[in-house]
Image (cartoon, rainbow, N blue to C red):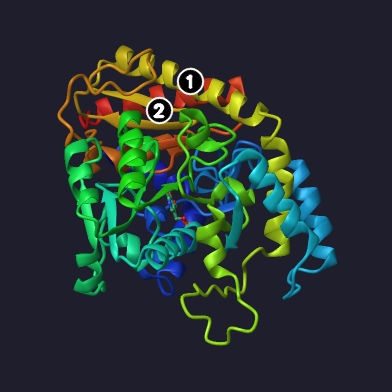
Amino acid sequence: MTSTIDDRYTALHPRSAELHEEAETFFPGGVTHDVRYFPPFGPYIDRAAGARKWDADGNEIIDYVMGHGALLLGHAHPSLVQAVQRQVERGTHYGASHDLEIRWARAVQALFPSAERVRFTASGTEATMMAVRLARAATGRTGLLKLRHHFHGWNDSVTAGGARMSAGLLSTAGLPPEWQATVTTVDQNDTDAIAAALDTGTIAAAICEPGGYHFGGGPLDPSVLELMRERTRATGTILIFDEVVTGFRASSGGFQERLGITPDLTTLAKVLAGGLPGGAVVGRADLIDQIAIREGDERNTGRVSHPGTFNANPLSAAAGVATLAEVATGEPVRIANERARRLAGDLNAAIRRAEVPGAVYGDASMLHIVLGRDVPPPIDDFTWNWDGAAPQATVPTTPAAVVWPFRRSLLNRGVDLIGMGALVSCVHTDTDIDATVDAFEGALADLRAAQIL
Ligand code: PLP
């Protein structure tokens, strides 16, 4: 019986319902991104500032989607707004090189010393596509080693093999079987399987989310990354860290800075461009220089081509430069981490008080919520506890029968999540956290009353 939650949701969102009905006539399923799927319809957002957004019905929402993770500084951060406003007046696309792209690359390199060279793309998906292509060109091999459930965007190379997404497992129709055959997928903590795959000598690149699948929803033992670094080096395989979410967030210099492990290539996006479209592949000069056009060599044999209308777009560059200037102070990561840790602790306390199965855990400012499943208590109310689990173990996920009523109930109380996760920014205040915990507690009570939990 979810009628109380659902009736309230419908009553609070009449305009969103109307817009959704119209959207269904244009967009498959009424939405423009898989993760925005929300039954029966999601809230339509009208404007956003700081940690909050307002929907088309005037409801105020504390936001933990945060631009799918792009908004470490929150919505409409003043320095970013100023930079983009200034740039929009100076032109949105020069179809030519410009000073800001150099400043953007310099800011990236200052935080990611592994970035000997930088190539901007329009998205994270394009960045991983390019990283894999560079690895294949450099090694002359086609194989790609993926860790199970790790997500790298939706290009054909990396979609083969599937991935864990908030709303379930990502796999896709429409991929030629030949693509599937290029990918070897192994359990993320299974070091024997990783070593065996690399030792075949057929793998061009090993790619992973260094914090574990689904931005740390399934945390990865750092010793696996050490093994991957050692075996990729020994076998001439390119190691790609996909830091699209964790770059500038796991620490200012991403996971690689925290762990002191340097990949050959890194893919970046999201915080990189501060909420405007943008991505980059960065790393070893000899790999990325394969893109350079060689004068006098008209056939450009062995060259990796890379056009792209929106590469290093001036607006994205302006937003990126403004964002990375803030990140470089270290404060955004420090504050977001502190708030996330407090939020996780308070939410875990709420789960215990409600006596429902589940837990909240995370890494840096990336939180994950499991409800309706027994899970080992997180270490320090924050860190996922594998508790001696086997390498192929995955973190249990909240059943769909819980997810949607819970998300609707939370929205009724003014809080929005990304899937069952929360991406915390440096502008979430203690007041926001208190209000979030109240909403969470209320939603747990709603689900208990409806006998869902
Ligand atoms: N890699 C990871 C780890 C991601 O989480 C995402 C997107 O969420 C991507 C790649 C793809 O980035 P984009 O959505 O910018 O194409």
Q: Nearer the viewer, residue 352 or 15?
A: 352
Residue of label 2: 362
- Left or right, residue 116 beside residue 407: right
Q: Which mark is residue 414?
A: none
Question: Ligand 1 near label 1 (Cβ, under 8 Å)?
Answer: no
Q: Quadrant of the N terminus?
A: top left
Task: Give how far apart the Cα atoms at labels 2 and 1 are.
Answer: 8 Å
Q: Residue furthest bottom?
A: 298
- Left or right, residue 449 beside residue 130: left
**Label 2 Cα crowd, 10 Å radius (few <14 / some 14-19 / many 20+):** many
Please, is residue 66 above or below residue 302 in the view? above
Residue 45 x/y as whole percent: 56, 52
Badges 2 and 1: C-beta atoms under 8 Å apart? yes
Please, is residue 369 above or below residue 262 in the view? above
Labels in figure, total: 2
Q: Nearer the viewer, residue 207 or 440?
A: 207
Residue of label 1: 341
Residue 396 x/y as whole percent: 22, 34
Tell me if residue 199 can be seen.
yes
Query: Label 1 amino acid?
Result: Arg
Q: Nearer the viewer, residue 301 or 411?
A: 301
Say which label, 2 or 1, has the lower sequence index: 1
Q: Residue at x 55, y 20 (%)?
A: 338
Residue 405 x/y as whole percent: 31, 40
